[in-house]
Image (tube, rainbow, N blue to C red):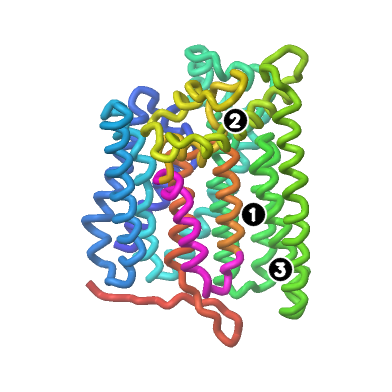
Amino acid sequence: MYKRTLRILIFYLIIFSSPILLDLLFPNFATLLELSLITLLWGYTWIFIRGKLNKKERKIPDFFLIFLVGCAMLSVIISLFIRDIPLTVTIYRIFPYFSFYTCIYLLAYLKRKYKLLKKLLICIIILSNIVSVGIIYDSLGGLVEFPILGERLVEWEQDSGVLQHKLRGGQRRGSFFIGGSTTVYPILSLGILSSMILFHLQGEKRKYLWGTILNLSLVWLGCFFSLSRTPLLLVTVIICYLILRFFLLSRKSKLQRKLFISILCLLVLLATPILQAKLYEKINAKAVNILSTGLSAEEIANYKRYYAWYQGVLLFTDPESYIGYGLGTSNLAVKNNKLLRYNQYNYHYESSIFSAFSEGGIVGLIVILLPFFIIIFCSRKTPHRDVYIVWSFLLVTNLFAAPIYGYPTQLAYFMGMSFCLVLKPVKSSARVITIKQKVKSY
């Protein structure tokens, strides 16, 4: 059963490592296939796995289940009876909230076998490297000539026309099968987290450090060739942090490390008002339509994001937003929103957090953000707590800056969250990290 669980997790990681791989391979019924795969994972977890967990192991996953069911019922009632959203739309939009949350059960079960858990971490690291190489290959236009997939990409271009600038020149943004460059960042961040957990479990020995550095370098290149600013910034931050942690601060005293980190936090606090002022200046510099003539393509893209985020912030001044406009109405809410003085933006919020808030109100916001607070709380006594905190902070930042809350990213989020919640390493006198293995015979 342990090996079967490992194989199932690896299968789902491969299938959902690309944002639109299923759409390219099975264009006619990709959505139905996604929903079926998620349902099958739920069935496997509920029938075969949950009953094998003891009361302590089920505590956190069961809490999430009860919490999600309560939030879902409230959101469905608001969507159906207050906002008059069609039932089919409501059901489809509720799936992302439940999709791969069962990973918490699966990881709680699999952690009993350290060797299998190690294999899973290695698989995730390799997959993140493959995705990075795929992004680089994509950015060079190689996927257009790739057998079968290249033909599907060209067909998709002919049907929709929206990908012409990517396939026929113009701004090439590698995204590993043209799924949006920011949507692959959760898989890459999961690779970073897995690499650091594995490095820590191996005792942080120098002989394992170079493999970690190689993985981080490939991830950085993947983000760089995606031409997406947010993932590149975030992965650069975490790499700099890890260099500080394992090279510059490892030989320092505890007081010196705290002093250094305090100085960094102070610099961040000082820089925050400056960044806020710059954003406000950018937003108000142009009281005209952001698509007006005279702006370059890059300026237009930037102003779209500025106004999208600004309008998302304005949602918090709208009392109706706190109960939500209904599941599946994020884009519609943007178009009908009258909070801006000018009709400058009517696409989407460029933010998963603002989108969830517009659809589910305060309930949707809690569903997205609460897991990260629980991660920080549950990992407070683990030796690598700081790695979990950095990973959680960077993912929340990416959620704020990109509209990526879909099935592939859900898998990465819940897989990373499961690692953070179920792994309880204990520091020994030799500074070697081990996992308490609870092997039971069934």
Where's residue 318, x and y in %?
Answer: 49, 35
Choose between 415 and 119: the one closer to the eye: 415
Magenta stretch: give its range: 363-386
Query: Which residue lies under the disc numbered 2?
Result: 308
Q: Position of residue 24 (x, y in %)?
A: 45, 27
Foreground tag (2 vs 1) = 2
Q: Secondary structure at mark 2?
A: helix
Numbered label attached to residue 246 = 3
Q: Residue furthest bottom?
A: 429
Residue 27 showing in the rendered view: yes
* Quarter of the figure with residue 246: bottom right
Is 349 inside the magenta-drawn segment?
A: no
**Residue drawn where x is 38% and y is 59% of the image:** 104
Kindly identify which residue carries mark 1: 215
Give the distance between the C-alpha atoms of the residues marked 2 and 3, in whole angstroms. Answer: 38 Å
- 3D distance between C-alphas at marks 2 and 1: 34 Å
- Image vertical order of residue 32 relative to residue 381, above or below: above
Q: Amino acid at mark 2?
A: Ala
Q: Earlier in the sequence, mark 3 or mark 1?
A: 1
Q: Which residue is found at the position 62% from the left and 33% from the top? A: 310
Label located before the other in sequence (2 or 3): 3
**Mark 3 vs 1: CB contact within 8 A:** no
- Identify whether 368 is placed above or below 430: above
